[in-house]
């Protein structure tokens, strides 16, 4: 294209104010086009506010070469300055922080409006965890007035369950008599966890069939007697579960109303239809766990809010869920169990984002464990059946992850085996390269020249053959884990992330394509920062013959609607997973249908935050 035409094209794309500047510099008359009798006529006008490209091109094409060149240079310069200015302005007003609290390190990443990683830090996790979050944000040094949201992945709650500590005693009320009397609540729990929550189970009438028909009617008097016993024991957290409550939740809601009227204020209620899927015992377990964590959730969420307030960050914060979506502070207080698997999920989502791959295997090597998962369509493959948390069966949404006792802090035995024991967050004190006395996997990586961490002179005495053999053994175990997780023999790229991924070589046995993206060491924090909001439908549908497509369309619409209600930006929501399971043992064409939809968080739909931790969205 002629230089004059290029210049004119650039000029007309500028706002009116900048058009005036360019035109004045070139002494170009402003043009206004008037349409008359099907013809376009040119009318020079100094006071007009519009500049049409065809008139500008005509004028510049007739201008001397020097003026055309000047037009092109000036316009190009102004356009570049505008682009940079607009990008800087937008970056400075729409930043978000992602934080992931691990057993060894607390990672943080600052992302701009275009999802570029602007800064990233890795700091040791502290015993109280919250101060580690504050230290990580301080190290990021973000412009606090520009931070619009903070996303946090935490291990607080799953650690409390594993340890059997800081759990609130729970009254577990099940609606299902006479059909469910054989197995009382918490019958298969490990003794430590059952004792920690008190082991208080109550069996009452109620519940539904798969199609919503009553299994047995609720007995208000029975529930009132149950409430009297709960009050006598001083229990302040109640878990209510009912047979087929994901299909019909009315019984749980009515039972909670009766119990609340009898127990008064100050008692928390967790209802199973809000938490789990079809499957009574596993859903009930998840509800009891959630109820036991409600008091701790209040403390933790408030602590996060205080940590952000200390840094003068007033933006709302959200917690990552097991499936890679977000929940706000209020929902986190009510459903802390939804955070259990957020760590591996964040790492895999971050790996997909940083590598640009949507289908791959992800190896996230931290300080204590290596988590192996499979990405399908950019989201972690979810566990097909029930999952376990601290030896307790649950059925809430969790990624299908294989954890191996291999990490950067893993102890290395005299025979070259690494793990499962680890120095954890004491790596910078106990590892040889930091002047400690414990041989760790990180020491092996430094001795082999794979990493420049600490003082390499402290591992110069290690036998080279021993080091190579120990690292080869780590690679073999990782390759075996990936092979166990994949479902086909197709070539599968591997993305290595996490601070401990220095242990992963450029090629693994059977997996030649191993990638380590930029910012691999904070992929979990990046995954938290890019988390989306979602909605899910999971229930038993009656599917008449010839009506399958209509039923599926209705389920999709419901899932998308829930994602929008959760705070997703309209137009960004998409269905990422559909699962159909015909129930052959149930008459009437019953089919369990699960549909998951996700979308980008629409911060514009949030009310103005009044302080750190102000949240406004809920995951349906």
Image (tube, rainbow, N blue to C red):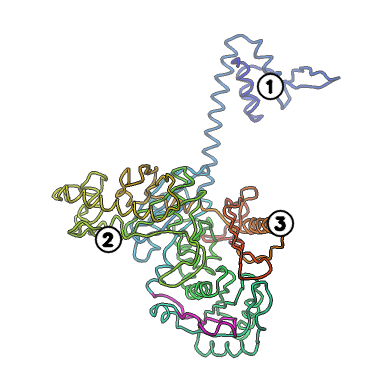
Horizontal arrangement in the rendering, residue 103 relative to residue 12 (left or right)? left
Among the 4 quarters of the image, the one containing residue 560: bottom right
Horizontal arrangement in the rendering, residue 292 relative to residue 541 (left or right)? left
State the CA–CA distance, disc 1 to disc 3: 50 Å
- Considering only vertical position in the picture, is 229 above or below 154? below
Please give the label number shown on residue 549.
Answer: none
State the CA–CA distance, disc 2 to disc 3: 52 Å
Binning the other alpha carbons within 10 Å of mark 1 as few (below 14), some (14 to 19) or many (20 upward) gives some
- Considering only vertical position in the picture, is 158 above or below 469? below
Please give the label number shown on residue 419.
Answer: 2
* Total numbered labels placed on residues in the image: 3
SS of the residue at dot 2? strand
State the CA–CA distance, disc 1 to disc 2: 69 Å
Foreground residue among 92 and 462: 462
User: At 64% from the left edge and 29% from the top edge, which residue is drawn?
Assistant: 17
Magenta stretch: includes residue 176? yes
User: At 23% from the left edge and 44% from the top edge, which residue is drawn?
Assistant: 449
**Sooner in the amino-acid sequence: mark 1 or mark 2:** 1
Q: Nearer the viewer, mark 2 or mark 3?
A: 3
Q: Which residue is mark 1?
A: 53
User: At 50% from the left edge and 86% from the top edge, which residue is drawn?
Assistant: 234
Magenta stretch: includes residue 441? no
Dominant SS type (magenta): loop
Q: Which residues are magenta?
A: 164-187
Among the 4 quarters of the image, the one containing residue 46: top right
- Considering only vertical position in the picture, is 183 above or below 334? below
Binning the other alpha carbons within 10 Å of mark 3 as few (below 14), some (14 to 19) or many (20 upward) gives few
Q: Which residue is mark 3?
A: 550
**Sooner in the amino-acid sequence: mark 2 or mark 3:** 2
> Which residue sits furthest top?
64
**Sooner in the amino-acid sequence: mark 1 or mark 3:** 1
> Which residue sits furthest right?
37
């Amino acid at each position: 294209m002629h230089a004059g035409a290029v210049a004119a094209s650039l000029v007309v794309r500028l706002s009116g104010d900048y058009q005036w500047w360019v035109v004045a510099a070139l002494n170009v008359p402003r043009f206004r086009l008037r349409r008359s009798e099907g013809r376009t006529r040119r009318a020079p006008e100094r006071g007009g506010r519009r500049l049409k490209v065809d008139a500008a091109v005509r004028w510049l094409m007739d201008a001397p070469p020097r003026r055309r060149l000047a037009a092109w240079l000036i316009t190009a310069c102004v356009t570049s300055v505008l682009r940079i200015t607009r990008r800087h302005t937008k970056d400075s007003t729409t930043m978000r922080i992602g934080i992931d609290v691990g057993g060894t390190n607390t990672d943080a990443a600052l992302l701009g409006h275009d999802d570029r990683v602007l800064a990233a830090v890795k700091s040791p996790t502290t015993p109280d965890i919250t101060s580690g979050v504050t230290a990580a944000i301080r190290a990021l040094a973000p412009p606090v007035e520009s931070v619009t949201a903070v996303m946090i992945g935490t291990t607080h709650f799953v650690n409390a369950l594993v340890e059997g500590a800081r759990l609130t005693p729970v009254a577990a009320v099940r609606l299902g008599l006479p059909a469910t009397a054989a197995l009382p609540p918490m019958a298969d729990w490990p003794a430590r966890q059952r004792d920690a929550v008190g082991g208080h189970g109550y069996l009452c009438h109620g519940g539904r069939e798969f199609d919503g028909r009553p299994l047995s009617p609720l007995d208000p008097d029975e529930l009132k007697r149950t409430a009297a016993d709960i009050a006598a024991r001083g229990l302040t957290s109640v878990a209510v579960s009912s047979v087929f409550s994901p299909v019909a939740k009315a019984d749980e809601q009515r039972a909670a109303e009766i119990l609340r009227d009898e127990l008064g204020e100050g008692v928390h209620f967790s209802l199973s239809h809000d938490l789990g899927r079809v499957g009574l015992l596993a859903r009930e377990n998840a509800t009891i766990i959630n109820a036991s964590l409600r008091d701790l959730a209040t403390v933790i969420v408030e602590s996060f809010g205080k940590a952000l307030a200390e840094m003068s960050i007033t933006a709302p914060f959200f917690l990552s869920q097991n499936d890679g979506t977000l929940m706000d502070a209020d929902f986190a207080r009510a459903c802390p169990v939804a955070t259990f698997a957020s760590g591996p999920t964040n790492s895999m989502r971050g790996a997909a984002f940083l590598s640009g791959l949507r289908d791959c295997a992800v190896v996230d090597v931290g300080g204590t464990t290596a988590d192996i998962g499979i990405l399908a369509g950019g989201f972690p493959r979810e566990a097909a059946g029930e999952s376990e948390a601290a030896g307790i069966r649950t059925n809430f949404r969790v990624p299908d992850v294989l954890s191996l006792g291999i990490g950067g802090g893993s102890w290395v035995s005299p025979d070259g085996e690494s793990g499962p024991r680890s120095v954890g967050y004491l790596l910078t004190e106990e590892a040889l390269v930091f002047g400690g006395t414990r041989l760790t996997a990180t020491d092996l990586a430094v001795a082999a020249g794979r990493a420049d961490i600490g003082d390499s002179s402290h591992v110069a005495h290690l036998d080279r053959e021993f080091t190579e053999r120990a690292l080869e053994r780590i690679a073999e175990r990782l390759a075996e884990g990936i092979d166990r997780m994949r479902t086909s023999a197709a070539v599968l790229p591997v993305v290595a992330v996490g601070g401990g991924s220095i242990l992963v070589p450029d090629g693994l046995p059977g997996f030649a394509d191993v990638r380590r993206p930029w910012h691999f060491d904070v992929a979990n924090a990046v995954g938290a920062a890019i988390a989306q909001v979602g909605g899910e439908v999971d229930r038993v549908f009656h599917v008449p013959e010839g009506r399958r497509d209509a039923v599926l369309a209705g389920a999709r619409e419901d899932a998308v609607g829930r994602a929008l209600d959760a705070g997703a930006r309209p137009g960004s929501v998409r269905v990422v997973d559909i699962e159909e399971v015909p129930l052959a043992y149930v008459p009437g064409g019953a089919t369990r249908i699960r549909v998951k939809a996700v979308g980008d968080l629409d911060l514009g739909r949030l009310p103005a935050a009044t302080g750190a931790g102000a949240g406004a969205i809920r995951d349906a």
